Structures are given as C-alpha cells and as structure tokens.
Amino acid sequence: MWKPIALLVLSNLFMTFAWYGHLKHKSTALWAVILISWAIAFFEYCLQVPANRLGSAYFSVTQLKVMQEIITLSVFTIFSIFYFQENFRWNHLAAFCLLVGAVFLTFKEW
C-alpha cells in the first residue's frame, strides 16, 4: 500500500522540476526548455503510471486523484521554499488544511 504513495511522491518531484525548474533559467531558449521538460516528464510518467496501476488495487480512482493532488501540493510547497526561496504564508497553510479536509471527505466511508 505504501508503494503507490512513494511512486507518486517521486513522480511529482520529476514533474515539478519539469514544470517549474526552468523558471530559474529564463535565458534558455523556449524550444530547449520544452524539450528538456519533456525529457524530465518522461521519468515522471514512468513512475506515475505504475503508481496508479498499483494504487488502484487499494484505492478508488477518486481517492488516487485526491491523494495525487495533496502530494503535488506538498512537493511543490517544499520545492518553492527551497528552490525558489519563497515564503510559506499563513494563507498557504489555510489552503493546505482545506485540501486535507477534501482528502478526509474522499476517504471517509459515509
């Protein structure tokens, strides 16, 4: 049950760098950034697809998607703090708490 979650975390590391890492290199030609981003995203897909395949044995598709979004935002938050030195503000924490509430509602058996 932990393998899909670990794969989702790793896949999100690759995707976050593919989508946002180039913003520190704005002088690089756009076509080059696109090709590099696609190359990085290839590895993201190599982790994401197995994560969803394995995860579907334990979680519903909705649960997988909501979990994916929380992981994405968690990875992005850490990335933005350490890679871009952005500040983590109270409203970011409030938004994150609301998303955790969404996870609770998704996983709760009513």
Image (cartoon, rainbow, N blue to C red):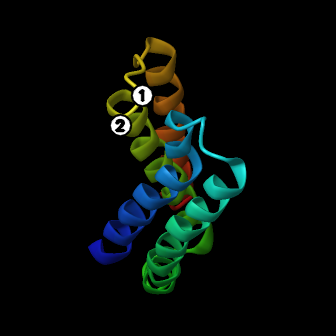
From the viewer's perspective, tell me whether residue 107 is left or right of residue 9. right
| Residue, disc 2 | 78
Quick one: SS at disc 2?
helix
Q: Position of residue 74 (x, y in %)?
A: 41, 42
Residue at the limit of the structure toward the left, as seen here: 2
Q: Residue at x 44, y 14 (%)?
A: 89
Q: Is residue 30 above or below residue 68?
A: above
Q: CA distance from mark 1 to mark 2?
A: 10 Å
Q: Quadrant of the N terminus?
A: bottom left
Dot 1 or dot 2: first in sequence order is 2
Kind of residue indicated by mark 2: Ile
Q: Residue at x 54, y 64 (%)?
A: 63
Q: Residue at x 51, y 58 (%)?
A: 15
Q: Residue at x 44, y 76 (%)?
A: 47
Q: Quadrant of the C terminus?
A: bottom right
From the viewer's perspective, tell me whether residue 75 is left or right of residue 91. left
Between 110 and 17, the one lying in front of the other is: 17
Q: Position of residue 80 (x, y in %)?
A: 43, 32
Between 18 and 98, the one lying in front of the other is: 18
| Residue, disc 1 | 84
Q: Is residue 44 above or below residue 82?
A: below
Q: Is residue 37 above or below residue 88?
A: below
Between 51 and 80, the one lying in front of the other is: 80
Q: Position of residue 70 (x, y in %)?
A: 48, 48
